Image (spheres, helix red, strand yellow):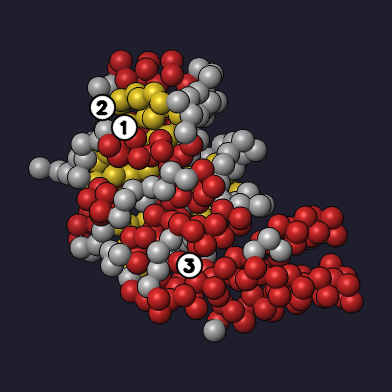
Amino acid sequence: MLDLVSVIMPAYNAEKYIAESIESVIAQTYTNWELIVVDDGSTDGTAGIVKNYSSIDNRIKYIYQPNQQMGKARNTGLKNCNGTLVAFLDSDDIWVPGKLEIQVASIINQQVDLVFSNGYVFSESVDQVEYEYKTLCGEIFGKLAQRELMRHNFIPIPSVLAFKSAIVEVGGFNEDISIHNVADYQLWLKLLLGGFRFFGLEDKLFFYRKHNSQSSHSDPYSFEAVLNMYENQLEVPAFMKKEVNRAKLIWASNWYKVYGINKESAKILLKKMNQYPFLKLYVAFIRVSMLFLGVKYSLKAVNRVSLFLSKS
């Protein structure tokens, strides 16, 4: 018998896009699934839309909870699902029809604990893709993989299919509000550090929607959530402490490269970075670069440092 896949979909004021997301689950060629929609305190028409679908298709279940953010909503879904395998789809993203069929076969054939894939990024219509969302392919396991994941999150959550038992074993999603928009990233790290095996597929299996109201680690100041995670919310072996410090510098460098593009935003970002003792020397270096070289050339200096850190 085919494994039951539990699809967990957190939703908050999602009436604009959630029907498209649900339809992409219904359209799956792999039909042994259940969809758990966790309404995280919506005040719009989200509940009515989901309940309408659940009245038509008994594989779709609706759960309401007071607003407690993504980590809690996903954990609520995990506690109320019945599948051996779990997948995650946010209420504004879309899957291609063969997503589950391809990944169920892959996770069994590759004998791994989690699979993920490439995908697409779009705004309004899947017919107007802005660019491809490229990840890593092949087996992801061991110290080199752990180091690579620490330096950047290459696993998009709508692409993931995993064994529920593995996620439960490492404690599920972190519910701390300070890191709520990087809780998925922390979960992947906990799994890899816990010895679980991943596999990246070349297939493009999802459409990630970009819009103003979404909450994700692409937010310009969510590097604080990443740094807080590394400082307070992630246990790593003693021999990897040096690698963690390097990863934090790389994250800080990458945020500065993206969001330090003018003097005003650079000052705001540097002020936030300076709150972290381990970044004070690095902040001083950037400020000196800005003073003598200007913002444009300070970005080039930071880029060289980031490249050096990434290759070493």
Type of amino acid under label 2: Arg
Residue under pointer 2: 59
Q: Earlier in the sequence, mark 3 or mark 1?
A: 1
Give the class, few, some or many, for how many residues have Cα within 10 Å of label 2's Cα (few <14, many ≥20): some
Residue under pointer 1: 35
Q: Earlier in the sequence, mark 2 or mark 3?
A: 2
Residue in the image at 65% along x and 38% along y: 212
The answer for how far apart the CA atoms under marks 3 and 1 are is 31 Å
- Depth check: give the residue in front, 253 or 174: 174
* Mark 2 in CB contact with mark 1 (< 8 angstroms): yes
Please tell me whether mark 1 sits on a helix, a strand or a loop: strand
Please tell me whether mark 2 sits on a helix, a strand or a loop: loop
Type of amino acid under label 1: Leu
In the rendered image, is residue 162 in sight? no
Type of amino acid under label 3: Met
Quarter residue 109 falls in: bottom left
Which circle, 3 or 1, is nearer the viewer?
3
Give the class, few, some or many, for how many residues have Cα within 10 Å of label 1's Cα (few <14, many ≥20): many
Q: Describe residue 218's horizontal placement relative to residue 144 as left or right.
A: right
Residue under pointer 3: 150
Q: Position of residue 244 (x, y in %)?
A: 50, 71
Quarter residue 309 falls in: bottom right
In the rendered image, is residue 47 in sight? yes
Which circle, 2 or 3, is nearer the viewer?
3
Q: Position of residue 191 (x, y in %)?
A: 33, 60
Work out which quarter of the rendered image holds the C terminus and state it. Answer: bottom right
